[in-house]
Image (cartoon, helix red, strand yellow):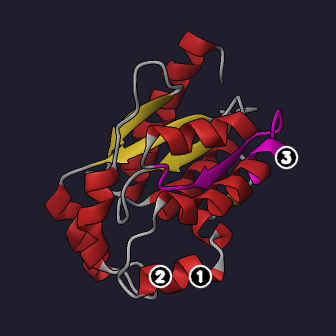
Amino acid sequence: MSTPHVVVVMGAAGTGKTTIGRLLAEQLDVPYAEGDDFHPEPNIAKMSAGVPLNDSDREPWLDAIGQWAQGRAGLGGVVSSSALKRVYRDRLRSAAPDAVFLHLTGDRELIELRMHERKGHFMPTELLESQFATLQPLERDEPGVAVDVGGTPEEVTERALAALRRLGESHSCG
């Protein structure tokens, strides 16, 4: 399966956006971009200190991700981005109108456990509460699918591919 669309792998911290994003990109044979790499240094410093980002903090980050997605229009790609609010997803879609969203969802306890287990990431577990408080799930009119993160990364990726195929069949996207 390949896609000319950019798939934005979204969800709260700890849902596996990087892991699933990389596996998905490999399966789709398209480039992967790590959303955290688009954060300006002040954002990383703020999150590392346990301070949630506000909307204005996120604007340059979302714009940078949107520019990358725009550059992959018609070619395909996968990029991770929490994209927690509808307004953030709308901002990404304004730069890359053909982007589709893969919302990784799951049991909060599982996500918190995974956050505790990961090494070398700047996002502290304490910010998970603000992530869930901010999260606005995909709405019916948004191009995307939700996939539960329970199971192995390979199982989640297979479910994601199947969901994206179904989305593509109904929206001519894959």
Above or below for 7 versus 22: above
Quarter-wise, where is residue 33 in the image? bottom right
Q: Are marks 2 and 1 in contact (CB under 8 Å)?
A: yes
Residue with the mark numbered 3: 71
Q: Residue furthest front?
A: 56
CA gap, disc 3 to disc 2? 29 Å
Mark 3: secondary structure = helix
Above or below for 108 versus 84: below
Mark 1: secondary structure = helix
Residue shown at the point (37%, 64%) measured from the top left: 13
Name the front one of labels 1 and 3. 1
- First along the sequence among labels 3 and 2: 2
What is the three-letter code of the residue carrying label 3? Answer: Gly
Residue shown at the point (62%, 71%) measured from the top left: 39
Q: Are marks 3 and 2 in contact (CB under 8 Å)?
A: no
**Magenta region: which residues?**
68-83
What is the three-letter code of the residue carrying label 2? Answer: Lys
CA gap, disc 2 to disc 1? 6 Å
Residue 164 sits inside the magenta stretch: no
What is the three-letter code of the residue carrying label 1? Answer: Pro
Q: Is residue 28 left or right of residue 57?
A: right
74 or 45, which lies in front?
Answer: 45
Name the front one of labels 3 and 2. 2
| Residue 132, x across and y down, in percent | 27, 55
174 or 112, which lies in front?
Answer: 112
Residue with the mark numbered 2: 46
Q: Which mark is residue 42?
A: 1
